[in-house]
């Protein structure tokens, strides 16, 4: 229902003002009533996210590639047990006449180390029995740096014969001994890198010299023939292009 408009004039204006004030008061009351009622927040509730160990705090990481299976020699555990059984009695020639048995244990440490190196040089391509006999003859002549330098090539060759490649070994022994005298004061080098620089000394000899002479394990002196055996002992190592036998 609509209210009748009052007559024009002063009374009409007064009525209009009263009507306006009434409408304003009603609007303010409505606003106050609306503000007193809590509104539902439109913000989304936060959700706690748990991450596995190693993923970081909320940072998405790239999926790691699956690890490749580790290479192992075929039947290596069986082969190891067979070798242990074969070596159980320690009765091979190397156990009695190997390089570690050829030097004079009562000699001064420097002389002992020199004899170890020479026995290793003689042992290349030579049976343990032959190497042991040659070292015994050398020791009977006094096996030191000075005695080898004073010995002529013919005499040295007669003493070490019949070790394999004895002529080449005479040359290498004299050259190496001269280097030891000039550069190392008659002793042998303390590192594999320096040992392999000596004439006639390879990686296998260097690792064995470090172990026997310096009591330091720098690697494994692997027999080169082991890489080519078709029987129970080989091949054990994964083929690697450019690999050097004895340098593990």
Image (spheres, rainbow, N blue to C red):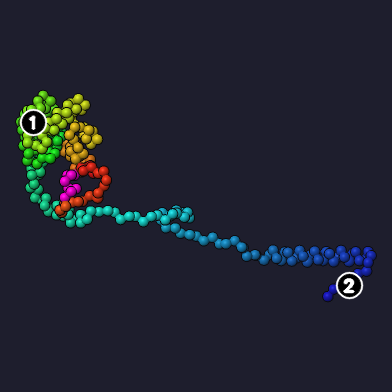
184 vs 128: above or below:
above
Question: SS of the residue at dot 1?
Answer: helix
Where residue 163 appears, x then y in whole percent? 9, 37
Q: Position of residue 54 (x, y in %)?
A: 41, 54
95 on left or right of 52: left
Where does residue 240 sit, x and y in percent of width and height? 26, 47
Disc 2 target residue: 4
Crowd band around label 1 with a 10 angstrom C-alpha radius: few (<14), some (14–19), many (20+):
some
Q: Is residue 96 visible?
A: yes
How would you rate the neighbour count of disc 2 (Cα within 10 Å): few for under 14, some for 14-19, many for 20 or more? few
Helix, strand or loop under label 2 = loop
Q: Is residue 101 left or right of residue 194?
A: left
The reply to whether dot 2 and dot 1 touch (C-beta < 8 Å) is: no
The x, y position of residue 105, in whole percent, is 10, 35
Q: Is residue 69 above or below residue 110?
A: below
Q: Where does label 1 land, which residue?
A: 157
**Which mark is first along the chain, 1 or 2?**
2
Please report the residue visible at 90 percent of the width from the left and 64 percent of the height from the top: 13
- Can I make out residue 100 in this image? no
Q: Residue at x 18, y 35 (%)?
A: 201
The range drawn in magenta is: 222-229
Residue 60, label in figure: none
Image height check: is 107 above or below 242? above
Instruction: Give the Cα distance between marks 2 and 1.
Output: 145 Å
236 up-or-down from 195: above or below: below
User: Magenta segment: does it hold 42?
Assistant: no
Q: Residue at the location (18% across, 51% down)?
A: 234
């Amino acid at each position: 229902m609509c209210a009748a408009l009052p007559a024009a004039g002063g009374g009409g204006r007064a009525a209009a003002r009263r009507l306006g004030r009434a409408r304003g008061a009603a609007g303010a009351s409505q606003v106050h009533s609306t503000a007193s009622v809590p509104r539902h927040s439109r913000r989304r509730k936060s959700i706690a996210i748990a991450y596995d160990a190693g993923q970081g705090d909320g940072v998405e990481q790239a999926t790691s590639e699956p690890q490749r299976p580790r290479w192992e020699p075929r039947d290596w555990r069986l082969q190891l047990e067979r070798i242990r059984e074969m070596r159980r009695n320690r009765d091979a020639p190397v156990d009695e006449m190997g390089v570690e048995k050829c030097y004079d244990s009562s000699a001064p440490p420097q002389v002992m180390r020199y004899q170890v190196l020479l026995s290793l040089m003689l042992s290349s391509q030579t049976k343990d029995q032959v190497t042991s006999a040659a070292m015994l003859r050398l020791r009977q002549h006094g096996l030191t740096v000075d005695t080898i330098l004073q010995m002529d090539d013919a005499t040295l060759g007669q003493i070490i014969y019949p070790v394999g490649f004895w002529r080449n070994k005479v040359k290498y022994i004299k050259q190496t001994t001269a280097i030891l005298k000039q550069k190392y004061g008659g002793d042998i080098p303390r590192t594999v890198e320096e040992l392999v620089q000596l004439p006639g000394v390879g990686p296998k000899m260097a690792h064995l010299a470090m172990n026997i002479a310096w009591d330091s394990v720098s690697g494994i002196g692997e027999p080169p023939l082991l890489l080519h055996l078709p029987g129970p002992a080989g091949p054990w190592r994964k083929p690697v292009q450019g690999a050097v036998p004895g340098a593990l």
